[in-house]
């Protein structure tokens, strides 16, 4: 994030944020496919009474590919999250120094808060940027967007704000 970005505007998506959204979207597709395989297994059991195992050796090549891709996404996500955590760990001591200076100034009886220096603001911006990256990579943003779409759909299918109640759920 640049130091002179306009206040109130969202920063541009970083490559990690974009990749996080891509991973989340692909993972959602794969989870739907895996759920369909599970439904097929249940349907076959109900129709035939024959239990088909969900073990890796007894599944179709398509399901095996879905499971493998899900593992790859999980591994990639874990690697990127570890990278972000390592970067945050490097920045924590610097932020701790600024926090100690503020605490010392407060203990010394200064009434005014210490102003935020450009260096501290730059550090805060970098920490915020890493936290945004983490939210996109770990799927939080994707899940929040999906929940918002669901909430909006529920709201739009209700009659109107005056007649909306718990019976509409």
Image: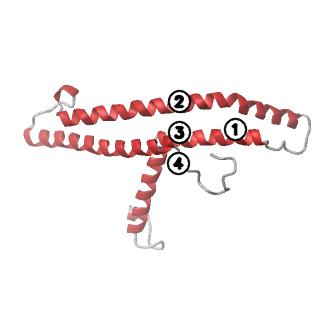
Q: Nearer the viewer, mark 1 or mark 3?
A: 1
Precedes in sequence: disc 2 or disc 4: 4
Residue marked by disc 1: 123
Q: Residues within 10 Å of mark 1 (few under 14, many from 20)?
A: some
Q: Which numbered dot is residue 13?
A: 4
Residue found at the far top of this picture: 57
Question: In the image, 48: left or right of 115?
Answer: left
Q: Residues within 10 Å of mark 3 (few under 14, many from 20)?
A: many
Residue at left offset 70%, top offset 28%: 93
Precedes in sequence: disc 2 or disc 3: 2
x and y percentages locating residue 53 in the rendered image: 18, 30
Q: Secondary structure at mark 1?
A: helix
Question: In the image, 149: left or right of 67?
Answer: right
Q: Nearer the viewer, mark 3 or mark 4?
A: 4
Label 1, label 2: how far apart the Cα atoms are: 18 Å
Q: Nearer the viewer, mark 2 or mark 3?
A: 2
Residue marked by disc 3: 134
Q: Secondary structure at mark 4?
A: loop
Q: Secondary structure at mark 3?
A: helix
Residue found at the far left of this picture: 48
Label 2–label 3 contact, CB within 8 A: no
The answer to which quarter of the image holds residue 98 is top right
Residue marked by disc 2: 83
């Amino acid at each position: 994030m640049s130091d002179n970005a306009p206040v109130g505007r969202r920063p541009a998506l970083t490559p990690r944020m974009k990749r996080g959204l891509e991973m989340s979207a692909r993972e959602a597709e794969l989870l739907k496919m895996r759920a369909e395989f599970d439904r097929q297994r249940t349907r076959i059991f109900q129709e035939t009474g024959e239990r088909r195992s969900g073990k890796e050796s007894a599944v179709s090549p398509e399901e095996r590919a879905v499971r493998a891709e899900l593992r790859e996404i999980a591994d990639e996500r874990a690697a990127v999250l570890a990278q972000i955590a390592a970067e945050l760990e490097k920045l924590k001591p610097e932020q701790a120094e600024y926090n100690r200076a503020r605490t010392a100034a407060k203990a010394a009886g200064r009434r005014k808060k210490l102003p935020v220096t450009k260096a501290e603001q730059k550090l805060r911006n970098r920490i915020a940027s890493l936290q945004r990256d983490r939210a996109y990579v770990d799927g939080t943003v994707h899940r929040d967007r999906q929940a918002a779409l669901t909430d909006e759909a529920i709201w739009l299918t209700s009659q109107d704000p005056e007649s909306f109640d718990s019976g509409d759920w």
